[in-house]
Image: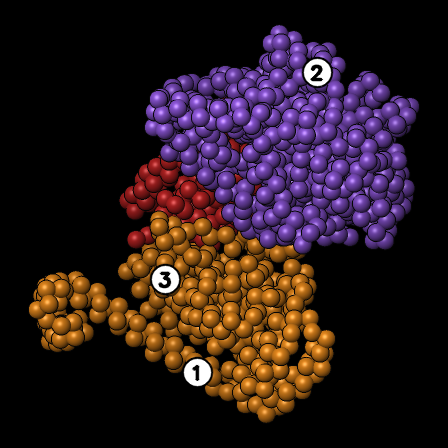
Chain colours: A orange, B purple, C red
Amino acid sequence: MDVDEIVRGLLNGNRRALARAITLVENDYPEGKDIMKRIFKKTGKAHVIGITGFPGVGKSTIVSKLTQEFRMRGKTVGIIAVDPGSPFSGGALLGDRLRMDGIDVNKRLWLDSGVFFRSMSSRGKAGGLSAKTGDVVRLMDAFGFNLVIVETVGAGQSEVDIIEVADTSIVVLMPETGDDIQINKAGILEIGDIYVVNKADLGGAEKTVKWLKSMLLLDDEAVRILEKMDHGSHNESVNDEILTDKLEKKAKDAIDRWIPPVIMTIADIGEGIKELADTIEKHREFMEKSGMLKKRRTVRVSRELLDLIMEDVKSRIINDTSLKFEEFVNRVVENEIDPHTAAEKIIEKLIFSKNSDTTL
Amino acid sequence: MFMQEDIEKIKRRRREWEKRCEINTTGEVKTPSDIKVEIIYDPSDIAHLDYLKDIGYPGEFPFTRGIYPTMYRGRLWTMRQFSGFGTAEDTNARWKMLLKEGQTGLSTAFDFPTLMGLDSDDPLADGEVGKVGVAVDTLKDFEILFDGIPLDKVSTSFTINPPAAIILAMYTAIGDMQGVPRDQLRGTIQNDMLKEFHAQNTLVLPPEPSVKITVDIFEWGIENVPKFNLISISGYHIREAGSTAVQELAFTIADGMAYVEAAIERGIDVDKLAPQLSFFFNSHNNFFEEIAKFRAARRMWAKIMRDEFGAKNPRSWWLKFHTQTAGCTLTAQQPLNNIVRTTIQALAAVLGGTQSLHTNSFDEAWALPSEEAVRVALRTQQIIAYESGIPDTIDPLAGSYYVEWLTDKIEKLAWRYIDEIKKMGEGSMLRGVLKGIETGFFVREISNAAAKYQREVEEGKRIIVGVNKFTIEEKLKIPILKVDPEVQKRQIERLKRVKAERDDLAVKDALDWLRNSAENDENVMPAILECVKCYATIGEMMGVLKEVYGTYKKPAII
Amino acid sequence: MKKIRVLVAKIGLDGHDRGAKVVARFLRDAGFEVIYTGLHRTPQEVAMAAIEEDVDVVGISLHSGAHMTLVPKVIKYIKEYGGNPDEMVIVVGGIIPEDDFEELMKMGVDGIFIPGTPIEEIIDFIKKKVAEKKKKTVA
């Protein structure tokens, strides 16, 4: 398939063309860049949903159930599941696809023409997402999916860059992982638009929800109340009431602001999935009405542009021998010049070099 | 086991010997369970063991040397070759041949659709009907399967799990038809769902209802078929999936404890259940490790039944087990070598005191065994039994410094796992095992061991003769049994005929009864027996159970 | 730069996944990107996955004896869903009688691996075949 065929196919609903386009983009082939340029005008319509969380919290099951729910609502769904690559071999074992039919074997999403599933390796990029995830999202967007769900490895503290691609970021937790230290460490309190406490049938779900809610509000008083709460303390019900009151008041005060809701699910049996889907739709609405969507995308695009520029600059510096990058490195090693001056000199050379004149 | 001053002398002499012979310079050797093996063992290695307490006499606690006082002097092990293929007629003919050849028990292999509780005309069954075992849809197939085989004369083993209740009901129905009293029916139904979640993956219902039905079978079986083994708690498949010997032992014992706990929760008297429990182990390549595993298993189970579950009857402390040689060790390359492998594995099983044994056929890495290969496999057992002199005395390896040390070592390592699982269940083995299934604990442990083993083979650290050493170019020409492709068609036709001839109203009533029993948390066995007798199909019955209990999807652990 | 992508698929009703899982791990360690399908997949699902994931290799593992029915179906559905099975390297592993080798190869299977095959051999085979096919499809 050549680029023309792929672009035409992709815009006309040919799944193989989409699949091939992803491969070319993911692997940084020159054709990939070409394709991205040509389909860009068709992007911007899909609602991009990011789902992240620690391993084992049930992300894949939620994605599966959510997809079923959105399909029932008549939406088409593209899914990108990003798994970590092996740092040793560069290989990867991508196993998210196999969860894609949840418990209900009768709804086999694998053969649904309104669903497209693609596994990706993060290829060692810290942050949980592959460098190319953003472009792959755009390909699915251009193909015409109403929703694009990006599921990322939640390995430790790397969830953060889900916000680089998603309009709505969902953080999935499970009961008892939700003690304050863990949540804060992972820095995930800043990134979620919606929080899900999955496996709510396990003990401690209510407590995790309360913790989350108070931490999200960052309300000193709420935190103080919670800190007083002992595990299994009999005063819990009293504290509950105080907390609930506070949360309600807070929510009323903040109509123009999105306060991340916390939703309990038991994804295995589909409980809470409808509510989650509703909330996702509500969030999208809020983002559009409040102008947040544009704002977020503006931030994202400026970061992306800077990234692209930096990448280009790096490769020029490394590949253009007239800039004498290696020589500068050696001189720094030999203590002949300090790194700051070296960097300034290289940049100066780069800006005035002929090479960059012609290509810029 | 020895006088303290003797031990001191022995230890001194050992050190001198090691020094003189520069013993330390030899490399490290480990069993597949990662147990470090010393170059030699002597009394000092087993000085901590107490003969009467830890080893004792056969037929007496803790049964390290065997469960029966006379062991093979009283009666040889049962030679039980697992077989079945094609339609019920084909399998019936193979069985009659095996009985004529001197086999003493039947063992049924079912095809995959039957094992999964699907009818032969199910779309998912396409291409699989009658392939790896016999296809069974209704009681009609059982009538043909046991034609001319009197159920009061044979004992029959059924390797089946999700539809175990249905198959047991079918066997009971055949017995009823032949006029054999139910208390005379002998055999074993595998009925071990927990290991399916760990390893074998014949998965239909979720874990909890699976255990519930298992206990239904216990409850019904104790009253109705008291000579039948109502479960075969199996390590075999755990091992085939790549576990170590220690994991096989530990996970099997853990499952056994989970079942007993579930039965006690139901109100079943442990002493009533215990005689109808049986086990099923693998016999793998490492000769001594396997023997030690069997001996350790008996000792552990005796302690568990007596001390943990408070069983009073010494008969309840027995761990009786079936053994199969390890299918996963068979190589496609130089297939005749498999006869030798199987012989060594069979020897380990016999020296480990097995109650029954299946020896694999040499061509099974290629396909279902041919008649000739099956015969050689059976002859292997017969040669051990009648020519080798091995059964002449009980547990002849007892007292071997190495075997006793290794038995003790394996037991200790297995206890470590059991404690871990119990901790996962906060003191309950049943919850611990269910938790381990949910979190993928078992699957992960086994997968890691499998990958480690394969890596050792790939790196040549573990030698497989004819595969990574002593290889040859060969053109293989072994006669292979191929299943007639018409089997599927014929089986589907029979199913249609049965459905056309049966009383549909009675079937509907029986299935409704089954649904009610399941929904109201009653024992499902009486309803299943009624369904079977009305010629309801396996697919229909499992269908009802799936509707009530839901279906299980395995979490992804690679 | 481009990683070889492999779909490791279990079709049919048999639950023996030891081989598939061990091979999947080793392929990852050899630097491949491996997509594992899990158990009990239908030929249609495997074919669709092969297309969406745009894999270079489809590895089918089965121990149930149903290979002569199920393997051709996978190939048929890849075509039906708009894919080109000739561009992919198709390998089958498991208990496969030698009598069936020829027919499987005729159906479009590139390699058959029986129990005991060193995984190194499978890896080398895949690397070689993927390179060959690439040349062919470019030419």
Dot 3 corresponds to which residue? A125
Residue type highlighted by circle 2:
Tyr
Residue B427 image point, x, y percent: 69, 52
Query: Taking B385 as reference, is B45 above or below it?
Result: below
The disc label shown at residue B72, or none:
2
Cα separation, mark 2 vs mark 3, equals 64 Å
Closer to us: mark 2 or mark 3?
A: 2
Query: Taking A260 as reference, is A313 above or below it?
Result: above
Residue B55 image point, x, y percent: 65, 26
Dot 1 corresponds to which residue? A294
Q: What crowding class fits label 3: few (fewer than 14 Cα within 10 Å), some (14-19), or many (20 or more)?
A: some
Position of the N terminus of chain B, as image quadrant, is: top right
Q: Secondary structure at mark 1?
A: helix
In the rendered structure, which disc, 3 or 1, sits on the residue that comes first in sequence? 3
Closer to us: mark 2 or mark 1?
A: 2
Camera-side residue of B154 and B368: B154
Is residue B247 rendered to the left or right of residue B111?
left
Residue drawn where x is 67% and y is 35% of the image: B300
